[in-house]
Amino acid sequence: MASPGRQHHHHRGLLDTSGRENGDGGNINITASGLLTLNGALLSTAGVNVAATTQAGNNAGAISVSGNGITSVAAATITANGGAGLGTNQAGGNAGLVVTITGTGTGAVALNTAAAITSSTGAATGTGAGGAVGGIVLGGPSITSTGALTTTGGVNGNGGNVSITTTAGNAAVVRSPAAAARQRRARPGATPAA
């Protein structure tokens, strides 16, 4: 029997619908009526093409998560990347069509520092076309995300869109200290922002 008041739902551990050899990733859809805590990674990445074949990259699946407030631990990365083409002039695989994180009701969306979200196209070969872009959509009453949001395109591919919409409170996308340190190392002599 459900307890009175706001319910709390946990996603425990890894949830992986990634494609296997020559396979596309499957879709992931998690919906909670109460607060949802993500405790492990969500993966829907394309499978790798079998060696010594010639074919386009495989496609990632879409990932959708919603709850009356969403929180995550460091391990709860979300990844929906397309696969690389193999052989001469092969297209890259499609990114996950959209990675959607939606806070419903009055619950805030608060994603952990290390809980990066990635939706990128697979690398094409030669003159092969880039895969179809994906995107990241965050929505809720208020949103805090300190993990990386990445929609970079693979070889010959375009980057996808990132959309952040709040219905009541603030939206904050903050670089983690580790990400800031990596950027400083990548640009010797750069002065950190005050």
Image (cartoon, rainbow, N blue to C red):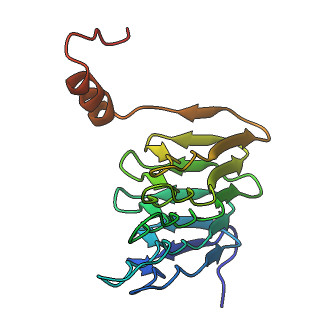
Q: Where is residue 148 in the image (x, y as percent from the top left)?
A: 44, 43
16 vs 168: above or below: below
192 vs 17: above or below: above
110 vs 77: above or below: above
Of 157 and 182, the residue lying toward us: 157
| Rendered image quadrant of residue 96 | bottom right
Of 70 and 129, the residue lying toward us: 129
Left or right: 176, with 162 as reference point: left
Of 164 and 171, the residue lying toward us: 164
Of 149 and 170, the residue lying toward us: 149
Task: Work out which quarter of the rendered image holds the C terminus and state it.
Answer: top left
Instruction: Please tell me how many numbered marks the rendered image carries.
Output: 0
- The residue at 54%/71% (across/down) is 60
Task: Work out which quarter of the rendered image holds the N terminus and state it.
Answer: bottom right
Q: Where is residue 70 in the image (x, y as percent from the top left)?
A: 58, 58
- The residue at 65%/49% (across/down) is 138
Q: Position of residue 174 (x, y in %)?
A: 47, 32
171 vs 147: above or below: above
- The residue at 63%/52% (across/down) is 135
Left or right: 132, with 72 as reference point: right
Q: Position of residue 137 (x, y in %)?
A: 67, 51
| Rendered image quadrant of residue 6 | bottom right
